[in-house]
Amino acid sequence: MSEVIRLKKGLNIKLKGSAEKVLEKLPVPATVALKPTDFPGLTPKLSVKAEAIVKAGDALFYDKYHPEIVFTAPVGGKVVSINRGERRKILEVVIETDKDAGSASFKKADPNTLSGEEVKEQILKSGLWPFIKKRPYGVIASPDQKPLSIYISTFDTAPLAPDYNFVIAGQLETFQTGVNALAKLTEGKVYLGVNANSAFTGVKNVEINTFEGPHPAGNVGVQIANTQPLNKGEVVWTLTVQDVLLIGRLFETGNVDFSRIVALTGSEVSAPKYYQTVVGAPVASLVQERLVEANYHLRIISGNVLTGKKVGPQQYFGFYDSQITVIPEGDEYEFMGWASPGFDKFSASKAFLGKLFPKKEYTLNANLHGGERAFVMSGQYEKLVPIDILPVHLLKAILVNDIDKMEQLGIYEVIEEDLALCEYACTSKVEVQKILRDGINVMIKELG
Amino acid sequence: MNFIKNIFENTKPYVQKGAKYHWLHSVHDGFFTLFFVQKNTSKSGTHIHDYIDLKRTMGMVVLALVPAILMGMYNTGYQHFKAIGELASTGFFEIFLFGLLKVLPIIIVSYGVGLGIEFVFAQIRGHEIQEGFLVSGMLIPLVMPVETPLWMIAVATAFAVVIGKEVFGGTGMNIWNPALVARAFLFFAYPAQMSGIKVWVAGSQATDAITCATPLGDAASGVISYTASDAFFGLVPGSIGETSTLAILIGAVLLIVTGIGSWRIMLSTIAGGAVMGLILNAFAGSASLSEANQVFFAIPFWHHLILGGFMFGAIFMATDPVSGSQTVSGKWIYGFLIGILAVLIRVVNPAYPEGMMLAILLMNTFAPLIDHYVVQGHIKKRLKRATVSGRTA
């Protein structure tokens, strides 16, 4: 065990509605969808037509520029519709599930006995490759690159995030298999970021770093930056706990099994707890009849309140997400809201009296609580980012499209989730994550 | 409250683009957002947003200014009745009322002119009305001598808003603190009316007051006319809001506790002033100084902190997040240099016995340069890290 890395900067946002540690298995949903829009920067090419019958693990579409990266059906059944948006952009490939459709079969083998190439091929073919992301940029890893190392964060500090120590119960061996497979993909090490009282400390074939501190201490980007910060030209890969489990299961069973544990959370959920479902399940299958009766609008988020995507009940759950959060929409006027003492208002600043009750849990809504302005306050972002960068200067470099400056100021080290707290706390309501993603897109376009 | 909300909602269509009263759009929007936090919800990025916004922030600063305002009003009356020799026979409320009636018109003119211009600019530029002037509009009266004619306040405010802020693009874009631009404008445009011994005490023109100069003015001519406790509590002549160190410190506590004012800048400015005061003390005995200068050099270093506009500048002006330094180490340098320069200009320059205004404006000008070097230092550190690591992909 290495020493504990204590991070001081950051903020825990205390929301009502954390998931009770109870797991309920849901039946396989009637439809499941894969959304190319879940993968930033992807240009998808379809491998199937509507009405095609697919087995779980059969390719649905692939990456135009990396045809070896395929996206496979999470369940077997019939491709019922391919929903397109503007300019025929593919939004969803929807499968009507069929229990008898079966599953594509892969090699069942201990990854320790396989070569790196064999492991890579198996992960690519099974459609699990997209779970491997790379830093910089937080996009799907390129199979032809060799990562310096692979990072897995085993805890999530985001508001109401699932507790992976609970999720992993009974699956530690599968996790170990997944880790062994990943270890074959890098000449460096696999790093595991753990928190105090972690269930993961017994995992072998990895180097463990222990972190302590408020959100975003659980973000893999923060963990990389505080152990071996990325420099220009360096590439590492990252995965989450459940992604590693999927890879572990692939090698243990020879089948693809996209099942995933999801925490249903938030102040508007009547009994927040954990559910087992599959990647790409319809949102309705998770939230229907599980929300509180409300005479106001609700916002359903696939993911957490900082980085998740807003979804409707008719839509599908995000590919990478392990959490659904439901909060009030808050589309109401508030009389003299900015002048109230604010006993019930949670704030990163100390300008509201709610600060006097540090243990209280809050119901926060999606209201902006103010108009968008130019940057005015200083020092606000720096307190929330435990990475050695100057967030405001980086964002300004992006706004003026200065690629040299973006590079110099460390755009390689951060993705949206690492600066999400800044966007939450910003007095001027600056769209931090959008600006950062725009900057990353410019970097990818200009420098590849 | 629904009643007011309905008025705003029902009139909204009439001020939309293309509608008959579109020219009132900014005014409508300004008041609507003042009374009601809007129902807009997050469209991209985080789904929750902090309750803090620029209105809250600026409101907090104004709240922090309240002790200085009240004390300034009281002191205005106090100095007046002292000058006409009726202090002993006048009650507390009468003193305060006199000050209130003297100061209120200045505040009204400052806000009226400033907000008027803001509304016009917001309308022409098509952006929302920005809250920066809520603070500037209160700072301007507080840095003025009480006998400044109202028309001068109006001209100075207009100059500050247009040249000090709007030409750069509005709140968040300005280089100098707008309130100090107003003060500097008057200082250079109307030097005869803005200095001397007749502007600091209300009604002193009409009397044969013996001493109506500021303590600093006296000190510059070699006379010590104040006691430290008067200077601390604010019972000396001076600009309206700057005299009471105590009231300013109460505001400082609020700014520091809420995290809205930078304690780094406050502390380093005070440290800078104290250090410069000590340096001057060391030279006080020098024979090459004039007699008056020997007195001014010799005043205890900490008196510089409670005299004149030093504390007001350190707490409310230097900490302006827009015109000040924005990096952590930059803030230390920026504040420290303000303190040094303020006391240096104050004591050494022969014409005007106050240096805070010019020190802050000067350092406002240099703040981007300081930040530039801090950022360059950060970049160098990163580059060094990259070469040391030497990992290859």
Image (cartoon, coloured by chain):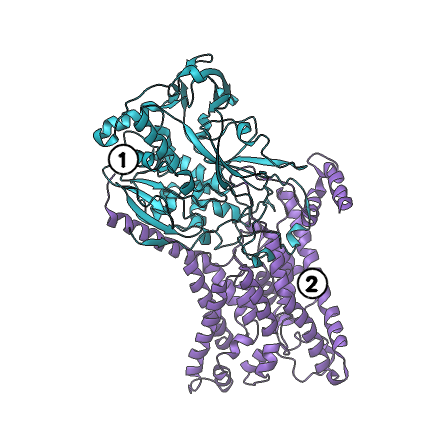
Chain colours: A cyan, B purple
Q: Residue at x 64, y 52 (%)?
A: A338
Rendering coords of residue B189 (x, y %): 61, 65
Rendering coords of residue A415 (x, y %): 41, 41
A99 or B350, which lies in front? A99
Q: CA distance from mark 2 to mark 1?
A: 72 Å
CB under 8 Å between callouts 2 and 1? no
Q: Pick the quarter of the image with the C terminus of chain A.
A: top left
A270 or A318, which lies in front? A270
Q: Which label is found at residue B107?
A: 2
Q: Residue at x 75, y 73 (%)?
A: B98
- Disc 2 is placed on an element classified as helix
A4 or B288, which lies in front? A4
- In the picture of the structure, the residue carrying the numbered disc 1 is A180
Rendering coords of residue B110 (x, y %): 68, 60
Q: Is residue B246 above or below residue B282?
A: above
Q: Quadrant of residue B210?
A: bottom right
Q: Residues within 10 Å of mark 2 (few under 14, many from 20)?
A: some
